[in-house]
Image (cartoon, grey):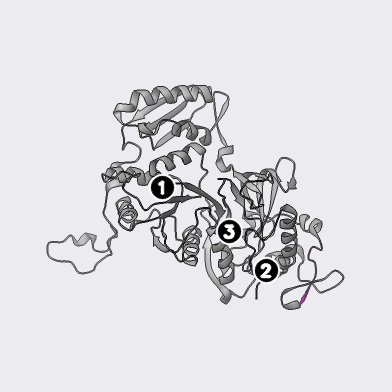
Amino acid sequence: MRPALPQIGDWNGIEELRELQRARLPQVLSWAARTPFYRARHGFGAAPGAGAAAGPGGAAVSGLPADADAFAALPPTTKQDLRDQYPFGLLAVERSELATYHESSGTAGQATPSYYTEDDWVDLAERYARKWVGITADDTLFVRTPYALMITGHLAQAAARMRGALVVPGDYRSLAMPYVRVIRALHDLGVTLTWSIPTEPLMWAAAARAAGLVPQKDFPDLRAVFVGGEPLTPARRRRIGELWGVPVVEEYGSTETGSLAGECPEGRLHLWADRVLFEVYSPRTGRFSAEGSGQLVVTPLYREAMPLLRYNLEDEVEVSHDPCGCGWHLPTVRVLGRSAFGHPVAGRNVTQHQLEELVFDLPLAYEVLFWRARAEPDVLRLHFEVPDEHRDAAVRELTAAVDRALGVPCEITALAPGALVPYEVLAQGRDVVKPRSLLGPDEDWSQALHYR
């Protein structure tokens, strides 16, 4: 029987939080000692000798770090380690105890596996549900993230069901869920909460307009938009909130770990340090610290099926232990992601984060939702959709903003709505049709076995 999971308010200050983390490490290490990967890498589970620690079921396990300094000397676990151990080299329980198997959406061309027990899922669901806009039994949550292999859709569904909410599984990039159907579901089902990447609420707004609906007025039940999975600039966040007239609540996590951070009532993103041990790694210095800038390294404290010791997510972050008015006594994090990277233009580095801020700083009345840019060695080319009546003003203001903020040569082109996101993507309502073997005399049987 696992101990009760810690809840916000169970500790008072950073020292009590660190003591909670230290108390969990022996159990995490004994779980890790069951896995083929960590046994081979660290010699966990060798014949008991001096310094042997109690393992699962009271059995002695040797080779485990005896203190925090010894734990900090363990080499980090990398994403490549997970890929090399595909599929079950990090399994710490009997396979019959697993509840779900997942893989991340990474683009390395190799599967990054992840798996959880039912007990692991209690921790996962609780962490996701820790939002200042709470999920209740009166809510209808529209889940618009992938369900296939990734954890994102399943995570939101589990958290919502744990709180008694109704779940609408909207999926993402599914032929069965075109934007026409998304808008119908949001409108007709009285959806109160949504979960998606930040780009999606912009697509919904455009699709709602295409259907003759006004996002702020025609979806009165909506009370918050949950987003994650992409870096989110303050300007794009404001634009989503303005379009829909509701709070935008950010979430941060991964398929390998579940939710790692969520927003407090003060609008700051807090790491769930009572459930996960966090470190910051500086590739420049090779040092690890409890706060500062660098790559986020995590050790889940309640993950039995697939223990991870000092797993480097490789996400660029800034972590701080400065006090927050919410009183949660948890570190805060700023997730930089790709915002820290860019391309050179005329000798200056230009990032997507910078451009997104400038585009969405344009007035809401200009109805700018979609844009693209290409950084060339001597010039920045930026295209964006804008109605004809706002074209000249939008081009003039955005050109001035780019010059003022970035100081690089730029060519800005205003495109008619539909040039970047075609109208048929927003308004096309054809659904997936199951294949049939028997057709009537007037039907095209060349399509019999095709999904459309």
Asked whether 68 or 249 is in front, the reply is 249
Q: Which of marks 2 and 1 precedes in the sequence?
A: 2
| Quadrant in the rendering for residue 113 | bottom right
Magenta stretch encompasses residue 385: no
Segment colored magenta:
59-65
Residue type, label 2:
Thr
277 left or right of 140 in image: right
Magenta stretch encompasses residue 64: yes
Using the image, determine if residue 199 lies above or below residue 25.
above
Asked whether 88 or 194 is in front, the reply is 194
Using the image, determine if residue 147 lies above or below residue 216.
below
For residue 200, the mark is: 1
Q: Residue at x 33, y 27 (%)?
A: 390
For residue 256, the mark is: 3
336 left or right of 141 in image: right
Q: Secondary structure at mark 1?
A: helix
385 left or right of 225 in image: left
213 left or right of 223 in image: left
For residue 337, the mark is: none
For residue 35, the mark is: 2
